[in-house]
Image: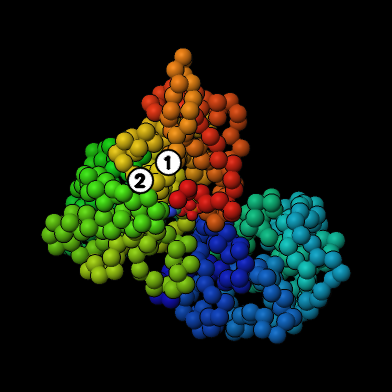
Amino acid sequence: MTDLQDGAVLVVDFGAQYAQLIARRVREANAYSEIVAHDLTAAEFAALNPAGIIFSGGPASVNVDDAPAIDPGVYDLGVPILGICYGAQLIASQLGGVVSRFEAGEYGRTDLTLSATQGLLAGQPINQSVWMSHFDCISELPDNFVVTASTANAPVAAFESELICGVQYHPEVSHTPHGQELIENWLDRSGIAREWTMANIIDEQVEAIRQQVGAGRAICGLSGGVDSAVAAAIVHRAIGAQLTCVYVDTGLMRLHESDQVVETFQKTQGIELIHVHAADDFFAKLVGLTEPEAKRKAIGETFIRVFERASGGIEDANFLVQGTLYPDVIESGSKHASTIKSHHNVGGLPDDMQFELVEPLRTLFKDEVRKLGTELGLPDEIVWRQPFPGPGLGVRIIGEVTPDKVDVLQRADFIVREVLRDAGLEREIFQSFAVLPDIRSVGVMGDERTYGYPIIVRAVTSEDVMTADWARIPYDVLETISSRVINEVDGVNRVAYDITSKPPGTIEWE
Ligand code: XMP
């Protein structure tokens, strides 16, 4: 638990998919927030000195035997509490009220009527729409609480006492239009300072990095992705020339990507950068390999060898900078998790590397990392970069990977992304790229028969990577992609668009 910061708003996770969203909304209101498990004792809560505590929603019913609960001592800590959905029911039930099962639950948009417009609901319209997802609801409040809002099937949709409030609906989702105001009201009525800004984060992190690294030397592997880029930029701000970045050019990067990384870090940010030109090593290892996992393994192992060779030359390096984000920390289940993400770099770095980790982003969500990157002066092309797999174009070329195929794919991929960007679609699309399959087909260009590769365009929307849908790109944009790719990329005579969602497809083709 030592990882948690003193004075945070703690979001207690009752197993809802919404806990992370609640923490993000609190942070958007400029108060620092972290997620904790529900089984901490009251003494453990007290030791964290929270500014406030929010109980999240959850799938259980408070009336079943092993329903997750909170140590009742938490109610006596004198800390402001907000319960949401299950969290609100838990407060009612633990403090002497009644939670019952009504005939009908409420799911989705629901009309709410306020009976008070002060405190938690200050300044809000009497009638408004809120997002509900419940079957049980509070039928009787404990003493000293007042009802402040209700809906058709939830007589107690909002309630408060001096220190403790609850709402049956979900203020954290965008379908509750006045939800963010409610969270801000709760912070204000609870006297919680709203001073958590990007500028403060930079100051705090810079100080923490200086404390950790002291006079030591740190290295950072840049992948071209946003996380490692922002991590490098903030560590550089903290320790300047004590940081050396290593960029391994695998030959499997997108067109102009390596130049851009070198330009941004070496020239604009003034960071010492070792640019390792290792394409030949990678291509040599990929000869004859066609099976996707064998290709991944070869790329991963080669990456480790090349990285070790390059970083081994940096004398006295004892710190390794990693762009671990808050969701990775939560998902790893341990507040002390300091293992290196295998997904983060190509194949991950070996466990026996003798470095202490510096992880300046481990309290931040992805959108916060982007804001931080902008604040640190990184260009939009890096800050808004789409996710890119560690093995790079190696998993977007079906079958054997050769320099010639990489050349064809790089040029087609560049056009795909350029056309989508010019059409203003780049930010709403989660990932967009070209794939080069291992087949050729007959076509005709002018009077000549052609026998060339098809290019498959893949573009997906996604919130969480686990599921994705193919992007509904307008036909005229697809048309521009098709004609430009075929006219400008030698060896390609067809363009296809992948209309498979995930599942059953995956985002990548290998
Ligand atoms: P799939 O293809 O499984 O991809 O739907 C999910 C996300 O992960 C990325 N991806 C990878 N990233 N190493 C990585 O660092 C890999 O081997 C790898 N394979 C897939 C993919 O781009 C998508 O964002």
Q: Secondary structure at mark 2?
A: loop
Where's the N terminus, which quadrant? bottom left
- In the displayed structure, does residue 350 sit left or right of residue 415? left
Would you identify the image quadrant in which residue 321 lies? bottom left
Task: Name which residue lies at 59% across and 48% down.
Answer: 501
Q: Mark 2: is the Cβ under 8 angstroms from ligand 1?
A: no
Residue 212 appears at what percent x and percent y? 26, 66
The reply to whether residue 187 is visible in this rendering is no
**Nearest to the observer: residue 237 or residue 245:** 245
Q: How many labels, in total?
A: 2
Residue at numbered disc 1:
438
Relative to 381, is 177 above or below? Answer: below
CB contact under 8 Å: marks 1 and 2: yes
Q: Quadrant of residue 117?
A: bottom right
Q: Residue at x 45, y 34 (%)?
A: 440
- Image location of residue 5, percent across then percent down: 43, 69
Q: CA distance from mark 1 to mark 2?
A: 8 Å
The amino acid type found where label 2 is placed reads Glu
Q: What is the image's colouring?
A: rainbow
Sequence-wise, the earlier of marks 1 and 2 is 2
Question: In front here: 285 or 304?
Answer: 285
- Find disc 2 in the rendering and name its residue: 400
Q: Which mark is residue 480?
A: none
Along the viewing direction, whichever of 336 and 439 lies nearer the viewer: 439
- Farthest residue, direction top: 447
Observer able to see residue 65: yes
At 67% from the left and 80% from the top, the residue drawn is 67
* Residue 490 vertical placement versus 246 (above, below): above
Q: Mark 1 is on which residue type?
A: Asp
Residue 182 horizontal/vertical position (percent): 66, 57
